[in-house]
Amino acid sequence: MTAWLPETAAALALALFLRLFVVNLARIKGTSMLPTLHSGEWTLVWRLPLLFRPPHRGDVVICHYPGRRMKHCRLLPQAFVKRVIGLPGDTVEWIEGVVHINGEALAEKYLDPARCRIARTRPPRVLGADEYYVLGDHRDRSNDSRSIGPIRRRDLRGHVVCVMWPIRAWRRVR
């Protein structure tokens, strides 16, 4: 009668291990990553690479903001999807709405100019040894490092690989 118990426990342990350390699904809520990601889409999040290598500039990641918790379950941190713009040691600066990294304008082909109309200038910010600057692609409607500051590597939870659902919207995320 309990012959199935070891197999069930092993399957549950394997599923938990995969979810925590290898791969996960994330549902996109909100418009902060338009036009790259749309609200309601489900994405495949590859967690393993961030355990062994730092993220690259331009990676779309799932991250946590320090102190931000889920509304309905205060024990769990709230997840956000953003793009890594600044890496440790970089100087990030805004000049008339254009992001500059180490004094050079950042080429951001993924942006839609209609969603990036705020042309502010911000003073330079030098990132620390374990700090990353993350931004949403919809710059007019994104809560990101401009307001919360840089985040640490431990707050990066995974790299968004592709949109899985709806099926008609399947695509790689670059």
Image (spheres, rainbow, N blue to C red):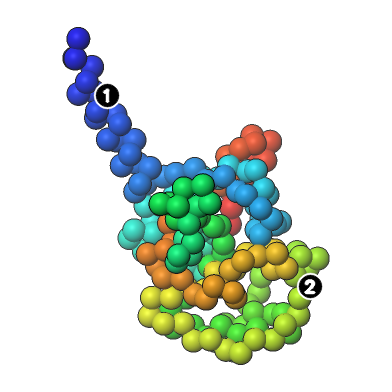
Q: Answer yes or no: do the residues labelled 1 and 2 have beta carbons within 8 Å? A: no
- Residue 110 figure quarter: bottom right
Q: Residue 18 appears at what percent x and percent y?
A: 35, 41
**Residue 85 in sight from this viewpoint:** no
Q: Mark 2 is on which residue type?
A: Arg
What is the spatial separation of the Cα atoms under label 1 and label 2, in whole angstroms? 54 Å
**For residue 28, side relative to residue 62 (left or right):** right
**For residue 142, side relative to residue 21 (left or right):** right
Q: Residue 137 appears at what percent x and percent y?
A: 66, 64
Q: Residue 19 appears at what percent x and percent y?
A: 38, 42
Q: Is 94 placed above or below 163 here? A: below
**For residue 93, side relative to residue 62 (left or right):** right
Which residue is at the front of the view, 138 or 67?
67
Q: Is 120 placed above or below 78 here? A: below
Query: At numbered mark 2, what does the secondary structure look like: helix, strand or loop?
Result: loop
Q: Is 68 placed above or below 6 here? A: below
Q: Mark 2 sits on what residue?
A: 117
How would you rate the neighbour count of disc 2 (Cα within 10 Å): few for under 14, some for 14-19, many for 20 or more? Answer: few
For marks 1 and 2, the one nearer the N-term is 1
Q: Mark 1 sits on what residue?
A: 8
Query: At numbered mark 1, what does the secondary structure look like: helix, strand or loop?
Result: helix
How would you rate the neighbour count of disc 1 (Cα within 10 Å): few for under 14, some for 14-19, many for 20 or more? Answer: few
Q: Residue 91 appears at what percent x and percent y?
A: 52, 86
Q: Is 89 placed above or below 13 here? A: below
Question: Residue at left 62%, top 49%?
Answer: 29
Is the N terminus in the top left, top right, bottom left or bottom right quadrant?
Answer: top left
Question: Residue at left 27%, top 35%?
Answer: 13
**Residue 143 in sight from this viewpoint:** yes
Which residue is at the front of the view, 75 or 89?
75
